[in-house]
């Protein structure tokens, strides 16, 4: 098939390469000229602008947008909607909010433009192994694009499919990523716990390999943990700073909106926030408060413990409060 592709980041560029290997024709556009050159060298055709990309395709046009959520995707789809024709197909395959997908679907429907929202998974490994695709939209349009999905998926009959109407693709991907947050956090905590029993001389990388065979928690993530720890057992040189791309927040928000208890996902998200704090002000305040009401030791910033005299509250005219907290 022939399609346009906008957005050649970590996933988009690899997706284009997978399409090219299967002899699809792909016209690409991205602001990053080096990303464009990387896929043009493999057979893609370069468009100098969005207008150029649209002009390079003939009806029925198929254009896949793989951009960050929010303004980049909104502005690109809006501009495309002004250039393409009735019956053309626009795809949003990024990590976008399902509410945005509902908006795009309604807006484009009024112009007779077809739309699919696709939650896409497998990161940088998708080029080799294929992508999991959760598709929202009408079945007829999905069937029309079947050759594209069969190429991008791990196998023609596996790892992709319609999950519901417009919005469902990104909604299911949000749920998927919320689950991912919880699994990642549990694994990180478990491997950290093993660090606190040096007397056992544990080999976490080997344990990850053992768990990969016959264990209830066997998974691709464990395979990656084994690789990481084999290369860098102490994780030296790695900052404990964990980003989030927004999907975990949306999952927790959806839990709140639907009165669905999601404590694991919520705590995993909160811990990512904590990982980014170089100077955790709240923890400092807790330490000082425990000293004030219970005389507990406070450590200085150099790590040396110091006993600060228990503070006598101005509102208490008798004794210092003792605490077993």
Image (tube, grey):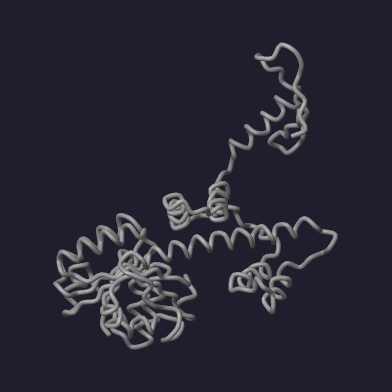
Quadrant assignment for the N terminus: bottom left
Q: Measuring from the top left, give residue 310's x and y in whole percent.
A: 75, 22
Would you say 3 lies left or right of 242 here?
left
- Front-lying residue, 42 or 198: 198
Residue 30 lies, with reference to residue 189, above or below; the image says below
The image quadrant of residue 132 is bottom left
The image quadrant of residue 317 is top right
Residue 103 lies, with reference to residue 271, above or below; the image says below
Q: Measuring from the top left, give residue 176's x and y in whole percent.
A: 48, 65
Residue sticking out furthest to the top: 317
At 45% across and 70% down in the image, what residue appears? 121
Would you say 292 lies left or right of 35 here?
right
Q: Measuring from the top left, give residue 314's x and y in whole percent.
A: 66, 14
Quadrant assignment for the C terminus: top right
- Front-lying residue, 182 or 195: 182
Residue sticking out furthest to the right: 199
At 58% across and 43% down in the image, what residue appears? 278
């Amino acid at each position: 098939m022939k399609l346009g592709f906008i957005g050649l980041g970590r996933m988009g560029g690899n997706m284009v390469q997978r399409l090219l290997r299967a002899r699809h024709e792909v016209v690409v556009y991205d602001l990053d000229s080096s990303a464009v050159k990387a896929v043009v060298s493999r057979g893609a055709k370069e468009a100098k602008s969005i207008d150029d990309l649209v002009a390079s395709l003939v009806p029925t046009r198929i254009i896949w947008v793989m951009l960050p959520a929010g303004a980049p995707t909104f502005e690109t789809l809006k501009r495309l909607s002004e250039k393409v024709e009735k019956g053309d197909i626009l795809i949003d395959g990024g990590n976008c909010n399902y509410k945005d997908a509902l908006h795009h679907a309604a807006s484009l429907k009024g112009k007779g433009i077809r739309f699919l929202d696709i939650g896409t998974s497998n990161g940088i490994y998708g080029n080799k192994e294929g992508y999991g695709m959760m598709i929202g939209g009408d079945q007829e349009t999905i069937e029309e694009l079947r050759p594209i999905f069969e190429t991008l998926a791990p196998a023609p009959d596996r790892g992709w499919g319609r999950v519901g109407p417009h919005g469902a693709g990104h909604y299911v991907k949000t749920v998927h990523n919320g689950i991912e947050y919880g699994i990642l956090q549990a694994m990180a905590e478990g491997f950290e716990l093993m660090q606190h029993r040096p007397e056992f001389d544990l080999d976490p990388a080997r344990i990850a390999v053992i768990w990969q065979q016959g264990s209830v928690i066997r998974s691709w993530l464990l395979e990656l943990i084994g690789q990481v720890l084999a290369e860098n057992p102490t994780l030296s040189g790695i900052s404990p700073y964990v980003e989030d791309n927004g999907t975990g927040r949306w999952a927790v928000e959806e839990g709140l909106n639907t009165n669905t208890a999601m404590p694991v996902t919520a705590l995993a998200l909160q811990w990512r926030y904590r990982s980014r704090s170089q100077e955790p002000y709240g923890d400092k305040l807790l330490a000082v408060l425990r000293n004030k009401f219970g005389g507990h030791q406070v450590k200085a910033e150099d790590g040396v413990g110091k006993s600060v005299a228990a503070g006598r509250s101005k509102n208490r005219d008798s004794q210092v409060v003792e605490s077993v907290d």
